[in-house]
Image: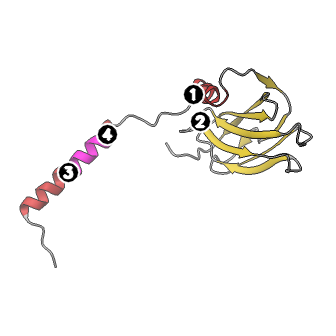
């Protein structure tokens, strides 16, 4: 059995108290917002104009539990060598990190579509951005109301 000496007990209590003080004084988690999402999109696509259309988002309007929110999408494209979807990115305007998923496609894919489950911390907009092989960029947005948060906080 190991006994804790007075000196080591004091050192332990001092370090534990210091850690508690840091946790108490630490700033709250910074949540993404619409501006952060726009900044992330600008980093990826520069000054390209975002067009509406071509992206079909399937998200619930109300998510009972933010821990497991189904997201399905499909981007209209012939998926040929001359015209295909290069990538699709998803952003959340109320999660700790704005980028929540990215997909890359080639002309060999029969269609640009996928399904995943995402976590949402609170009611927020989900923004999808699809880049086409010709450089065009399309976007779609949908609000999901979350009744129980899923990302902590």
Secondary structure beneath dot 2 equals loop
Residue at 16 percent across and 50 percent down: it is: 14
27 displayed left or right of 54: left
**For the residues bearing labels 3 and 1, Cβ distance under 8 angstroms:** no
Q: Is residue 133 magenta?
A: no
Q: Residues within 10 Å of mark 4 (few under 14, many from 20)?
A: few
Labelled pair 2, 1 in contact (Cβ < 8 Å): yes
Question: Residue 88: x percent and y percent?
Answer: 74, 39
Tags 3 and 2 touching, CB below 8 Å: no
Q: Which residues are magenta?
A: 15-23
Seen as rendered, the residue at the extreme bottom is 1
Residue marked by disc 1: 36
Residue 96 drawn at (x, y percent) = 53, 39
Q: Is residue 80 above or below residue 125?
A: below
CA gap, disc 4 to disc 2?
Answer: 25 Å
Residue 101 in the image, given as x and y percentages of width and height? 66, 44
- Graded by Cα atoms within 10 Å as few (under 14), some (14 to 19) or many (20 or more), the crowding at tag 1 reads some
Residue 145 versus residue 119 in the image, above or below: above
The numbered mark, 3 or 1, whose residue comes first in the sequence reads: 3
Dot 3 corresponds to which residue? 15
Above-or-below relation of 32 to 3: above
Which is nearer the N-term, disc 2 or disc 1? 1
Image disc number at residue 23: none
Residue projecting furthest to the right: 78
From mark 1 to mark 4, how far is it between C-alphas?
A: 26 Å
Q: Nearer the viewer, mark 3 or mark 1?
A: 1
Q: Residue furthest left?
A: 6
The reply, left or right, for residue 37 in relation to residue 54 is left
Residue that badge 2 annotates: 98
């Amino acid at each position: 059995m190991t006994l804790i000496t007075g000196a080591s007990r004091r050192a332990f209590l001092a370090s534990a108290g210091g850690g508690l003080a840091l946790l108490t004084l630490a700033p709250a988690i910074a949540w993404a917002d619409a501006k952060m999402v726009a900044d992330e999109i600008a980093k990826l696509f520069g000054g390209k104009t975002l067009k509406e259309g071509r992206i079909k988002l399937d998200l619930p309007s109300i998510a009972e539990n933010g821990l497991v929110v189904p997201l399905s999408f499909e981007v209209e494209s012939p998926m040929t060598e001359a015209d295909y979807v290069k990538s699709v990115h998803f952003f959340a305007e109320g999660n700790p990190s704005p980028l929540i998923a990215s997909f890359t496609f080639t002309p060999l894919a029969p269609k640009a579509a996928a399904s995943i489950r995402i976590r949402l911390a609170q009611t927020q907009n989900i923004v999808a951005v699809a880049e086409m092989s010709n450089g065009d960029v399309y976007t779609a947005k949908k609000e999901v109301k979350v009744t129980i948060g899923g990302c902590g906080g």
